[in-house]
Image: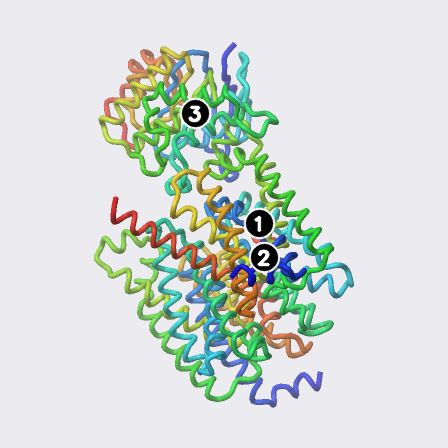
Amino acid sequence: MDGFLEMFSYSFIWRAIFVGVLISACAALLGVNLVLRRYSMIGDGLSHVAFGAAAVAMALGAAPLGVSIPVVLAAAFLMLRLGRNTGGLQGDAAIALVSVSAVAIGVMFLSMSSGMNTDVYSYLFGSVLMLDNHDVLLCIVMSAVILICYLLLWNRMFAVTFDETFTKASGLNVDLYQMVLAAMTAIVVVLGMRMMGALLISGLLLIPVLSAMRLCRNFRAVTFAAVCFSVLGYVLGFLLACAFALPVGAVVAGVQVCVFLLLSLVVQS
Amino acid sequence: MCELLTEAVSYGFMQRALIVGVLMSLCAGVLGVHLVLKRFSMIGDGLSHVGFAALALASVLHFSPLAVSLPLVIAAAFFILWAQGHSEIQGDAMVGVLSIGALAFGMILIALTTGVNADVNSYLFGSILSMNKTDVVLSVTLCAGVFILYILFYQRVFAVTFDETFAQATGTPTGYYQAVLSLMTAVTIVVGMRVVGALLISGLIIFPALSAMRLCRRYRSVVIVAAVLSPVCCVIGLLLSFFCSAPAGAGIILVQLAAYLLTVFISILRGRSA
Amino acid sequence: MAYITCKNAAFAYEGKIVIDELNFVVHAGDYLCIVGENGSGKSTLVKGLLRLKTPARGAVEFGNGLKSQEIGYLPQQTDVQRDFPASVYEVVLSGCLNRLGRRPFYGAAEKKEALMRMEQLNILDMRRQCYRELSGGQQQRVLLARALCATQKLLLLDEPVAGLDPIVTGELYQMISKINRELHVTIVMVSHDLEGAVGQASHILHLKNKQIFFGTKDQYVHSPIGRAFLGGEEHV
């Protein structure tokens, strides 16, 4: 127990908790819109793209974040656009298409340079305990931007998520809001990738929302509940992971899944 | 050029890779048509994560990976099928939950025991070039079985894919055929994971189907084109990867991507001239 | 013996009874039209008749040699069909699936049946065309041909003219009438379209979460319910 409490004297632990809470909150907010629009797997797809972009960046010796964010942004736009059923491509096929292509390209680039190394693994599985103050600052800024944007655009987001056609017909520039959502998702995925790893960030975007939907029946309640589940789940998962020396991303995702399963069994709608 | 080809094919590992690759991509190509049309494009991803959990479990229990992967992935495929019919959650959300849950479980298991090692590498990116004879025999048998089943059930697969309610209403036991399809999908993905790895398996499933659907308007034509295109791309991808010393899995997928973009181009040209 | 007999049947949706007190009979050669407002339980009843749902109460009996494989079904359109790559011929042929038994492939008899049905519905020349490229009315005719392949005896049509323009609607009704009279196929049709449907039918079943009328068309037209409904005086 002493060792456990002693942990809290380290600043990297506090950084990890702080960053995690912020990103979990943002992920939950965005996740509500993604899941309700039937884009549940977009987080998964984007995280694969993020991996591909990071791989290419590392192969070219460029800064991973600098390459990842624009590439993932572009991929998010592409997925949301292509999935509109124009040209005969469905939403999930669009996601799979873009994400698999990105990974293949990334792997190609990687193999042509240094090959697989621990850096790549940290992108796949997360490295939240290795964050520095620069990362924290970036995270604070991004999260603040996302939270403020989201609050200001709350009503429009709801309208577009609920019924895109009607909202477009009443004059709103739906495409713009699609792009804003895509951009925010891309940022959360890229930042979250550092934390949880590419393979698990999609869990943050999906599972707290599903848990919230089991409990609540209106949009505001679902959003609030999703954020709570996400943040509390992260903190609990983080503490457990530190206590048992397990990878943070995996334990947080595991906690979220367990919460969801529990709610599924207990709550009869 | 011919000497290069004969040289490549003379290697034992290349022969094994080509045989398994061709059969596996044949199965993935035809099943992909059904999966894409049923909005299950991401199922390869989800089931491969279950495969990861199975691998972790297998290494902890010291069982053969295939012996653990096959039943677990098949069970997961059935679970997804069940969840689709009985739960109010969307099908693809369930795939997501299963996928993340399995991955988290696998990672925790690995961390508790051995730690990350080379097996994870081959899981993620495929290890088709390092298959031994038993692997090949097993994979070939499984894929041949899946393909033969597919041919025998072709008409039923069509009916169930096009309009399940009608098939059920007119007396076809759709539950049974859905289960068979899940089984075939699971087996194909388990074998496919060896070939191109978990990160890329979705590609093998969707690309041939998407390419074929760009070109053809009839179901039978779509299936035939997918069945031909998939192994062709696989062979080209394997050979190119061999010559360029590139990872085989990524090479195959990139060739599939190129083929898809080609079909997009062709269909745009057709659109212009029509 | 009747093809279908409902005895005090009730069906539930998500645990709640949505349609109750069903007591009606369908005989061979009948043309039954099921009418009712939205939410009156029509779709649930359709599922019950297709044996996709079991009755919460009472019984639905099939007789006179009618087997579950012998009910043809014309559903409302589903999403998957709209962008599906399939030729008209493939779609119609798939109606013969319930006759295959253990055989993997369709034989000459099934193929002949499919071609015959397509000819009866005037879609033979479209057989190689892609289903998704047809107009709404043409697609309905393809699905009707498919339904006929699945049955000789009874056709169940769920809102067959929903979303079709008036001329196409009229043509479809004529086709259905022809099938009923000349091919001796029993028709059970669920419809919103009061005037058009009632005009063709021999019997009417009016639902409002329970059975509020069952009888011949003449009886309906002269009944208070029928007059109210057809006269437009009823507001729900």
Residue B98 numbered tag: 2
What SS does tag 1 mark?
Answer: helix
Reading the chain from its start, which is encountered first: label 1 or label 2?
1
Q: Disc 2 and disc 3: Cα gap in Å?
A: 38 Å
User: Residue C34 placed where, x, y %?
Assistant: 38, 23
Residue C23 numbered tag: none
Q: Residues within 10 Å of mark 1 (few under 14, many from 20)?
A: many
Task: Note whether residue C67 is visible.
Answer: yes
Q: What residue type is labelled 3?
A: Ala
Q: Which amino acid does label 2 sit on?
A: Leu
Mark 1 and mark 2 on one chain: yes
User: Which one is nearer the viewer's eye here, A142 or B121?
Assistant: B121
- In the image, residue C57 sits, relative to residue A68, either above or below, namely above
User: Which one is nearer the viewer's eye here, A120 or B245?
Assistant: B245
* Residue C146 occupies quadrant: top left
Side of B80 relative to C73 (left or right)? right
Q: Residue under circle 3? A: C147
Q: Are marks 1 and 2 in contact (CB under 8 Å)?
A: yes
Q: What residue type is labelled 1?
A: Ile
Side of B263 relative to A267 (left or right)? left
Q: Which residue is at a point 55% across and 63% down the rendered structure image?
A: B4
Q: Residue under circle 1? A: B80
For the C terminus of chain B, which image quadrant? top left
Q: Disc 1 and disc 3: Cα gap in Å?
A: 30 Å
User: Residue C9 placed where, x, y %?
Assistant: 51, 24
Q: Are marks 2 and 3 in contact (CB under 8 Å)?
A: no
Side of B62 relative to B194 (left or right)? right
What SS does tag 2 mark?
Answer: helix
Subunit of label 1: B
